[in-house]
Amino acid sequence: MLATLVKPISKGLLFVALVLAAINLRPGITSLAPLIEQIANELNLSRGLIALTTALPVLCMGLLAPMAPRLAVRFGLERTITGCMVLIGSALVLRLASHNSMVLIGSAVFVGAGIAVAGPLLSGFIKRHFVGKVGRVVAWYSLSMTIGGAGGAVLTGPLTSLLGERWHWGLAIWAVPALLAVLLWLWVPNKHEDPAEVGSGGGLPWREPRAWVITGFFAIQAGLFYTLTTWLTARYHEVGFDASQSNTLFNSYMMIGLPSAFVLPWLAQRYDNRAQLLLGCAVASSLCLGMISFMPQVLPQVWALLLGLALSGSFALSLVLPMYEVNTPLAVSRWTAMMLCAGYSISSFTPILTGLVRDLTGSYQVPFIVLTGLAISMVFLAWSLRTRATPVAAQ
């Protein structure tokens, strides 16, 4: 009803709504990283169990992504995104009671559910409202997500200190930008989708070989990102860096991704070199993880910075890919939903397995060697994407 009463709003306000929504897609996950050892010790949780706070949102982001096109048809794309912001904000408020481990883990599930549906629909939102400016707008979109992710990782520690070392308050403070997003998105006009575009199985392009290549690349880079968000600080601490040095290296890894998330999608559109940029990111990720696995004390700042550039860039470029494969907003949402569904479902196990292997071996080196192997496999997937895609109608 509200949408019918609101006059069309400017492209500028639509852009601000997109940016604010994107900022809220990561802090609910990354804000746990600087506090994860403290929380594990205070709640007496194993490393494998505490990793669920990162893994479960990622798993939800995978399993629930196919719901996005159907929900958009039923409620409208813009209003469904609004509902996702409500869910994310409510879950983060719930973390005020997260001294109960079940509440903490449950809030992670709700955060993941909100992100799962919002992600594919925001891609469709870009396709609908910013035709001809996809590369430029996706650059800002991915930059905004990176800002949110980096902010959650870098600012949660200082905010927790300001809040009297009450870590549950440090986690819940990230509800504020989510609730601000809700207020803005309530003013975004809602448009219903064509039900004919959603076929059996949610209309996801499961039979498209190229969709699987894109999904595979996305799954690996997402698994690497969320695993490093969870355990990179612990790896640095294990090899002899004190808490301050470890946090500085981790913050460098997170913050350097900001320019990469913005510049690479812009370059991909301007020079039509998406596959080449993906290949460069994959090679750089492999090199950096190899150094962190075998020689972590040799030029650690260099490898942390380069790794942040590479993984942030590969994520931003992954978001662009479905937009060049199909033509309609809902079709883009479906391709993105498949990428997120299979990609996040697979990648969600990487942080858990890393924590379990660390518990079994007593060292992070073995799981980091495996992560290096995964990064190398990204090189081959990026190479297979070097042929130019021709956009097609909805499949």
Image (spheres, helix red, strand yellow):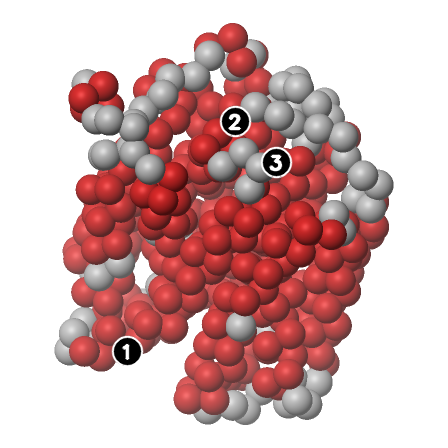
x and y percent of residue 220 in the render?
65, 52
Q: CA distance from mark 2 to mark 1?
A: 40 Å
Say if residue 250 shows up in the picture. no
x and y percent of residue 115 in the render?
40, 42
> Which quadrant does the N terminus fall into?
top left
Which mark is in front, 2 or 1?
2
Circle 2 sits on which residue?
329
Which mark is in front, 3 or 1?
3
Element at label 2: helix
Other-residue count near label 1 (Cα within 10 Å), few / some / many at <14 / 14–19 / ≥20: few
Labelled disc at residue 323: 3
Circle 1 sits on which residue?
158
- Tell me which corner region of the image, top left, top right, bottom left or bottom right, holds residue 260: bottom right
Residue under the point 74% across and 48% down: 272
Q: CA distance from mark 2 to mark 3?
A: 9 Å
x and y percent of residue 192 in the render?
38, 17
Other-residue count near label 2 (Cα within 10 Å), few / some / many at <14 / 14–19 / ≥20: many
Q: Relative to 251, is 378 above or below?
A: above
Other-residue count near label 3 (Cα within 10 Å), few / some / many at <14 / 14–19 / ≥20: many
Dot 2 or dot 3: first in sequence order is 3
Residue under the point 69% across and 66% down: 285
- Tell me which corner region of the image, top left, top right, bottom left or bottom right, holds residue 207: top right
Element at label 3: helix
